[in-house]
């Protein structure tokens, strides 16, 4: 799905360039950047190196605007992660509406209001070109506004900041690449550009269709994730007596009963097999987590430190994480492996594809940790994040 989003935002970038407020007056922009008139631009009486240089800084100013807008959304990343599915559903509906507006099916006076900053310069140079791109990109609201908004919504609902900025970057490349190409080959492309203007209505319809498709993808994904989450919650409400015993472990142990941990055989990020029953004779720190979970990410460095400490001392303690590829908001195994590598986490994490182990253990929130003693029985159940001292305490008390 991530690759599809990258293709979609790149196409949206190209369509933004072809919008009615940019393509028809492209010669005006280029004449300003080349420090010449439109007539001189058309007959080739301008300095190509100057045009190319100024266009580069012009597009850099545009890129700066887009990344500022994206960063303003990423400040709210915790809110977006918490309400990701709902935002995807609402965002999908908004993007579909924008697609219909872009095609002219829906009319809106508000979206048709355009604001531009006036810039005056006797001679364009890299600095003034950058300012021109930076200020003008804020004023293209009636044309690229709907498309850019869809990119920002997709960016805000991304799994992590790197993916968010990648989406904005790919959109920006799609948008500025034609500017650069036209500045390099203007004399050869001017006739083609004039021909493209004739098909502006069709281009707008294609742009609207792209918006609607991307909105539908977000809407379907958001609804699908909500349904998956609802199934998980229903499963937790109707879990087996064995799982109910796990979550009420301390009360059961008070009556003298022991709850045996559910066995499994899964593989970690290194391809190594882990069978829980093979670790009898050792204390197991079993942690269920997800890449999109902020509390999980906060406690994982502590797990890494304890993993190295216990390994260094050859202690009989196993630190083992459990991640569930393709469950709810979680990405695939490759996404999780990349996250572990980027964050420098080396402790073993087994992959519970689709979350079957999550269901068996009755996990209702991430992170959740179980301490399993040397005989294979659960001694501690800890929902929520822990600091290093607490982790060490529950491990030592579970020995």
Image (cartoon, helix red, strand yellow):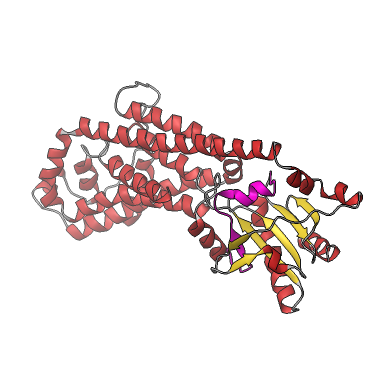
Residue in front for this viewpoint, 164 or 321:
321
Residue sitting at x 69%, y 37%: 238
* Outermost residue, right side: 255
Residue 125 visible in rendering:
no
Single out the residue that lies furthest toward the left. Answer: 43
Give residue 374's quadrant in the image.
bottom right
Residue at figure coordinates x 77%, y 56% from the top left: 260
Is residue 344 in the magenta section?
Answer: yes
The image position of residue 186, as x and y in percent, is 15, 51
Image coordinates of residue 110 in percent, x first then y, are 40, 24
Of residues 43 and 20, the one nearer the viewer is 20
Q: Position of residue 81 (x, y in %)?
A: 58, 44
- Please state the total of marks drawn on the protein image: 0
Tell me: residue 212, above or below residue 347: above
> In the image, 258: left or right of 102?
right
Q: Residue furthest bottom?
A: 313
Q: Quadrant of residue 140?
A: top left
Image position of 249 with respect to 312: above or below: above
Highlighted magenta segment, given as a residue range: 343-364
């Amino acid at each position: 799905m991530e690759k599809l989003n990258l293709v979609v935002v790149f196409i949206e970038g190209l369509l933004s360039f072809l919008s009615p407020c940019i393509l028809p007056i492209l010669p005006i922009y280029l004449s300003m950047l080349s420090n010449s008139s439109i007539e001189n631009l058309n007959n080739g009486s301008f300095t190509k190196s100057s045009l190319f240089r100024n266009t580069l800084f012009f597009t850099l100013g545009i890129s700066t605007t887009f990344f500022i807008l994206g960063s303003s959304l990423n400040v709210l990343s915790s809110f977006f992660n918490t309400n990701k599915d709902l935002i995807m559903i609402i965002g999908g509906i908004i993007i579909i509406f924008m697609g219909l507006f872009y095609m002219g099916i829906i009319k809106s006076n508000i979206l048709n209001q355009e604001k531009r900053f006036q810039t005056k310069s006797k001679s364009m140079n890299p600095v003034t070109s950058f300012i021109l791109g930076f200020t003008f990109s804020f004023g293209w609201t009636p044309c690229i506004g709907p498309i850019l908004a869809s990119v920002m919504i997709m960016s805000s609902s991304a799994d992590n900041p790197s993916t968010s900025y990648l989406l904005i970057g790919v959109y920006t490349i799609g948008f500025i690449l034609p500017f650069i190409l036209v500045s390099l080959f203007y004399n050869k492309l001017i006739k083609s550009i004039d021909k493209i203007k004739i098909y502006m209505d069709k281009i707008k319809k294609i742009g609207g269709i792209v918006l609607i498709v991307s909105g539908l993808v977000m809407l379907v994904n958001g609804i699908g994730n909500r349904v998956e989450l609802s199934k998980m919650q229903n499963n937790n409400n109707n879990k087996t007596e064995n799982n109910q015993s796990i979550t009420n472990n301390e009360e059961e142990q008070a009556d003298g009963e022991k709850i045996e941990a559910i066995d499994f055989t899964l593989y970690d990020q290194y391809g190594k097999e882990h069978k829980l029953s093979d670790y009898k004779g050792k204390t197991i720190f079993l942690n269920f987590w997800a890449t999109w979970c902020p509390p999980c990410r906060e406690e994982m460095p502590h797990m890494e430190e304890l993993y190295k400490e216990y390994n260094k001392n050859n202690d009989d303690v196993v630190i083992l994480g459990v991640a569930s590829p393709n469950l709810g908001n979680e990405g695939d195994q490759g996404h999780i492996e990349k996250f572990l590598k980027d964050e420098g986490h080396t402790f073993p994490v087994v992959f519970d594809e689709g979350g079957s182990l999550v269901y068996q253990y009755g996990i209702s929130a991430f992170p959740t940790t179980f301490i399993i003693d040397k005989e294979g029985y659960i001694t501690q159940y800890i929902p929520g994040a822990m600091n290093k001292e607490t982790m060490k305490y529950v491990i030592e008390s579970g020995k």
